[in-house]
Image: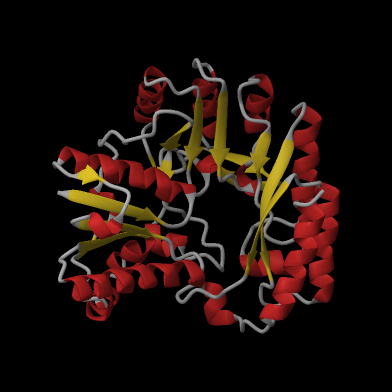
Amino acid sequence: MKFFIKTFGCIQNTADSERIKAFYWDNGYEEIDSWKESDLVIINTCIIRESAENRVYGLINEIDKFNIKNKKNIKIIVTGCLSGLAHKDKTGKKLAQLQRDFPEVSEFLPIEKISFEIEPLRGKTGTALIPISFGCSNFCSYCIVPFAKGPEVSRKMEDILKDIDKAISDGFKQVLLIGQNVNSYGNDFTEATSVSMGKKRFKSLFPKLLEEVAKKDLEKISFVSSNPWDFSDELIDTIAKYPNIDRLLHLPIQAGDDTVLKNMNRGYTSKEYLDLVAKIRSKVDGVRFSTDIIIGFPGEDEKAFENTVELCRKANFEIGYLNKYSPRKGTVSAKLYKDEIPQSEKKRRWKILNELINKK
């Protein structure tokens, strides 16, 4: 039996696919590079943006048409965010709707069924992907992830470290720690609190985890994605202490206007963000920053966009991952705000920010 896996979306989905591959290899399947020659197609889905979701539907329809035309019986399994969103609906209506809309899909598989006990099937070289948590509890108003993946759940530290030791024994010299919010790691383990950006937060265990990883025989340790409100002084000091921790830090801003940030439920102001960037630069030699920005969020008038441009100039980002806003059904922003900014204007703003950040 042969299987083909198609992964859409973020690096966490890529890491999940490494475990999915191992699961099917262990059950006697062989992975191949062409879905047309396979017996089974596994689609690991992303629904963060409408375009990603539409590509999933397009692939399902393409496989179905191929089956009909060629009298084939390639089975389709859908997992990832699309499946997660359906299974987390306690009424069962979303799953039933998907099953009605796509009867050609054999199973909508919750990714939780692919246990972290399964050793991932990684490539031979490059960076080992190490998930440290799953899900998110932040509920940014535009984001579907908490509804698709559920609340944040942290892996046990000893399991993460064993995973890294195995990667090292397999010859990996670089690791990437992955979570929807890596620097809130351990929030489900501890009730202790700390202060970040002047606000009381739980005491994250991420600095301790990062230090334990940095002590190992690794050339580079990177992590994504971190959120500004949990970027503690302890974390900054840990990064500064260990030169094998990557100096390119991914620190999503999403917008540079305070009203837009508030409507996004981001939990910080533009000044607090810039103060954090300045603090990190003062303590970590050679640090650089990448970021995420959502363009054309509802209410982002020309002045608000100019505030984002000005923040980008001050922050001097090395890389900007720029995404034009699209409402996702079920999120707060889709319920409360009209997507009133034309695509043509979003494209114009995208070009301005891309020229500023990515074409230096």
**Residue 115, picture quadrant:** top left
323 displayed left or right of 303: left
- Quadrant of the rendered structure where residue 275 is? top right
Residue 312, by quadrant, is bottom right
**Residue 320, above or below 338:** above
Q: Is residue 91 visible?
A: no
Total marks in image: 0
The extreme front residue here reads: 70
Look at the image and name its color scheme. secondary structure
**In the displayed structure, does residue 254 sit left or right of residue 97?**
right
User: Where is residue 354 shown, x and y percent of the image?
Assistant: 75, 58
State the residue at coordinates (85%, 58%): 310
Q: Position of residue 11 (x, y in %)?
A: 48, 47
| Front residue of this view, candidates 14 and 180 | 14
- Above or below, comparing residue 60 to residue 97 in the picture: above
Seen at 45% across and 28% down, the residue is 125
Please state which of residues 176 and 76 is positioned toward the viewer in this rendering: 76
Residue 139 point in image, percent of width and height: 51, 62
Q: Nearer the viewer, residue 129 or 251?
A: 129
Q: Is residue 206 above or below residue 3?
A: above
Residue at image point 62% right, 81% down = 339
Camera sees residue 313:
yes
Q: Is residue 126 left or right of residue 288?
A: left
Question: Closer to the camera, 36 or 214?
Answer: 36
**Residue 83 on image: x %, y %:** 31, 64
